[in-house]
Amino acid sequence: MKKIICLLAACCALVLTACNQKPSAPANSSSPIAVSAAGAQQHAQQDFVRVKGGQFERRGKPYVITGVNMWYAAYLGAPNQVGDRERLVKELDHLQSIGVNNLRVLAVSEKSEINSAVKPAVTNGFGNYDEELLQGLDYLLVELAKRDMTVVLYFNNFWQWSGGMTQYMSWIDGEPVQDPNVTQEWEKFMAKAASFYRSEKAQQEYRNTLQKIITRVNTLNGKAYVNDATIMSWQLANEPRPGNSQTTAEQKKIYVDWVHASAAYIKSLDAHHLVSSGSEGEMGSVNDMQVFIDAHASPDIDYLTYHMWIRNWSWFDKTKPAETWPSAWQKAQQYMLAHIDVAKQLNKPLVLEEFGLDRDMGSYAINSTTEYRDRYFRGVFELLLTSLKQDEPSAGYNIWAWNGYARTTRANYWWQEGDDFMGDPPQEEQGMYGVFDTDTSTITIMQEFNRRFQTH
């Protein structure tokens, strides 16, 4: 515990030093060249997504997120056989055509031997980075900029499908990573993942990775990431949680302190970009809304995130849709409204950055119907749009997830290395939540509401 406190104190000292440094006045600032440079810099600054009150702003205008999760997008950009740049361009063109303006993307993965983890990985041990996969991220940023789209990049994962926090701990303690898909010991897995916050070694290596990515210079256009307004936000992790159902008050505080310190460290490296947590909200805060509030009260966390999984959380039974839909939808509305109230309290924008539902009756087949998913999407969009029109801090959404043109030929629908990347990650069947390019009814709803959000 003393080591963690020292680490947090050091981080805070670093941030205070950075904040107290004042830029020197430019020489001969009245010259035409200086004025021109200053004007260009001011124009470039306007390209960054900012927070103004409880909403986002870009180029002096309101900016509402109408996005998708596409965790694998940087993989498609890789120049080697892992990538598929032709498909990436095709996916981005399609998404742009239906009004999508933002992607949420995995920036860093960790090499894992378990079956339910993506392969290859960006990091193959501490400090060992796959440069070709990082060049895939470079390519993605260039292509997004062409379409004036933005991206949220997350650095880690509480879950095992990209290596994540448990892989960090395995590299440190030498113990094999437990695959909860196999053992079904989710409580044990979550306790192990949360030990990441208490490990001084893990935190130092995590910050090394933050620095590696944030200070990167794009190999394709020569632009430093810190100066690239295509990046909307750096995100601490995918669904970071304080622990499992037995999480103590002390462990909750360690988690909150980690959120604050990690966000502050990112701000010390990059003053331009927003920082977000990647939290699921109350359900990802061990059902303690105060933990969610405390974690996001930091001035270095610019906006709130929350996720909503009505089937995963046993509100909705995919095999009994008619019977369970009414109560599930009631709980979903309550969940959204509760988080909107917190966003009002903190006066920060709020993004519902993950929500999805199975195909009807839990089918994974691409030709199966999506009646209840469509009903769910429409209901969520209507509630968020109403909230936005009432000047509440509902600042947008990212559906989970975009499968697009990907296909699987596996009879059991499980991903294997070399298969198409989908929005459904390797820890779950391919086709479970992802929206394919052929899901016409769902895409029509997305297109309608993307337009309505942008013109509200």
Image (tube, grey):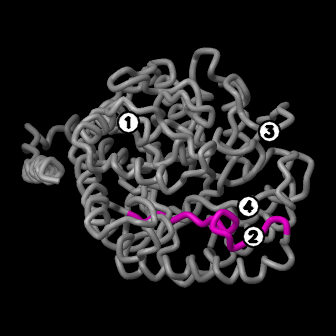
Residue tagged by mark 1? 168
Q: Amino acid at mark 4?
A: Leu
**Figure check: 105 above or below 124:** below
Which image quarter is the C terminus in? bottom right
- Binning the other alpha carbons within 10 Å of mark 1 as few (below 14), some (14 to 19) or many (20 upward) gives many
Residue 357: give its label. Answer: 4
**Figure check: 335 above or below 203:** below
Precedes in sequence: disc 4 or disc 2: 4
What secondary structure is found at the residue carrying circle 3?
loop
Residue 413: give its label. Answer: 3
Closer to the camera: disc 4 or disc 2? 4
Secondary structure, magenta segment, majority class? loop
Closer to the camera: disc 4 or disc 3? 3
Precedes in sequence: disc 1 or disc 2: 1
The verdict on residue 124 being magenta is no
What secondary structure is found at the residue carrying circle 4?
loop
Residue 376: give its label. Answer: 2
Q: Amino acid at mark 2?
A: Tyr
Q: Residue at x 49, y 57 (%)?
A: 187
340 to the left or right of 254: right
Closer to the camera: disc 1 or disc 2? 1
Between the residue at mark 1 and the residue at mark 2, the CA separation in whole angstroms equals 36 Å
**Figure check: 423 above or below 452:** above
Q: Amino acid at mark 1?
A: Tyr
Between residue 309 and residue 447, name the one nearer to us.
Answer: 309
Q: Amino acid at mark 3?
A: Tyr
Q: Which residues are magenta?
A: 303-319
Between residue 321 and residue 397, name the one nearer to us.
Answer: 321
316 to the left or right of 128: right
Can you see residue 47? no
Between the residue at mark 4 and the residue at mark 2, the CA separation in whole angstroms equals 8 Å
Closer to the camera: disc 2 or disc 3? 3
